[in-house]
Amino acid sequence: MGYGHVILSEDMTKGGAVETYEDAKSCARLFSDNRERIDGIIVILPNFGNEQAVVQSIDMADLHIPVLVQACDDDTSKMDLAHRRDSFCGKLSVCNNLYQYGIPFTNTKLHTCTIESDDFSQDISRFAAICRVVKGLRKARIGAIGARPEPVHTVRFSEKILQASGIKVVTVDLSEIIAAASSFDDDARDVKAKVSAIKSYGTIPSSIPKENILKQAKLSVAIDNWMKENELDASAIQCWSSIQQNYGCGTCLSMSMMGESGKPSACEMDVTGAVSMYALMLASGKPSGFLDWNNNYYQDRDKCVVTHCSNYPKGFMGNDIEMSNLDILGATLGEERSFGAVKGKIAPGPMTFARISTDDMAACVRGYVAEGIFTDDTADTPGGIGVCEIPGLQKLMDYLCQNGFEHHVAMNRSETAELLEEAFYKYLGWEIYRHMG
């Protein structure tokens, strides 16, 4: 399947198997020596196995990474003493010991399966995604560009609680980004390249002045440079109204292009929103959108309108995009200083949504995750617009209200709720609500 592996060679133990305490020590040393290479551990039980050897190998290696447990099918026509394997039974013993040792693990969908089966291939793909989420979040570096807009207390968060899970927040004053953008020459190589990238990214109305596109390009280069210098995985940006008033453009297009290239970016300096976007991207390998739970959809109580100005990556939209002026801010601050919104209707299809928050009162990270669909329904409203259908939406909205969740939500064109729940709850220790309708 293309994944690298670290495994005992056949000459290190009897047949390469891990059956004794000495075998366990050899396996643990091998894993520990390769800890930088290993994202997860797969336990294979071709027979009953030795529960203590398996668990001691993992315990002594001390990697604290996801574990997948597989057991092989018996051939029911070969159940004599010479041929039966008893993995069905042995798996219960191994899992019992993992539970006793406090080692969290992921189970295969089927209690037993063959190594060559499609079922096991799917288990590995799902497990690899869990490993990506856990590893990515435990070492995530999130950029916080600017201050939270004062009216939006919704997006307050705790850096310290995030740090306890390994998530580092790196801050920069918006004035530093503006100063960097303003310092570039119009003909600078990076600026010209960004202008070209913007023009090929989507459709720009002919009414947009070239100098406004140039401003957006310079802002993008300044943010890109800062992100690269600080080795950041995602960002949250003070997207109004200082940047429009003090520099003269929006941030949405810059954020959209970062998201398309694998660097998610959240609006209104919503750092935990950026973490949510990043987690979804790690799980699926696809760009995430950042949306408002915004409007009811007529009297259909399982549908709602989700929208933003917007900063949606074009891959998230699933359709051609238009890049033009911010609508609401353009009307209040002036269109001449509001270029940079990504507009269009989100294409229909399945989606997963998630939200991570820090709960300062309970000193923990908590969140929710679920799946739904983007529908082909229309809503006559500006910006980036979508209509989604979620079974039990009213129950979900009640949960969000009662538990103080934000109006922002991250969405992704994938079906990854189950594995995200497992990564968040089982391996990161976060309090997670899985909405099931």
Image: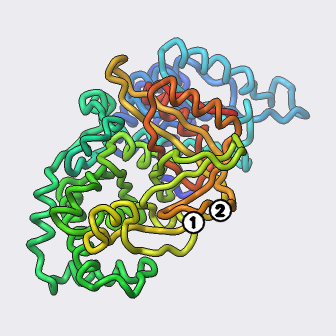
Amino acid at circle 2? Thr
Vertical comparison of 334 with 418: above or below: below
Vertical comparison of 358 with 144: above or below: above
Q: Secondary structure at mark 1?
A: strand
Residue 103 appears at what percent x and percent y?
A: 48, 21
Residue 106 appears at what percent x and percent y?
A: 58, 31
Q: Are marks 1 and 2 in contact (CB under 8 Å)?
A: yes
Residue 156 appears at what percent x and percent y?
A: 30, 34
Residue 298 or 273: which is nearer the viewer?
A: 298
Q: Residue at label 1?
A: 345
Q: Residue at label 2?
A: 378
Amino acid at circle 1? Lys
- Measure how far apart labels 1 and 2 are at the Cα level: 8 Å
Residue 295 appears at what percent x and percent y?
A: 56, 47
Residue lying at 11% horizontally and 58% vertically, measured from the top left: 176
In the picture, the quarter occupied by the N terminus is bottom right
Question: Image quarter for residue 112?
Answer: top right
Figure coloring: rainbow
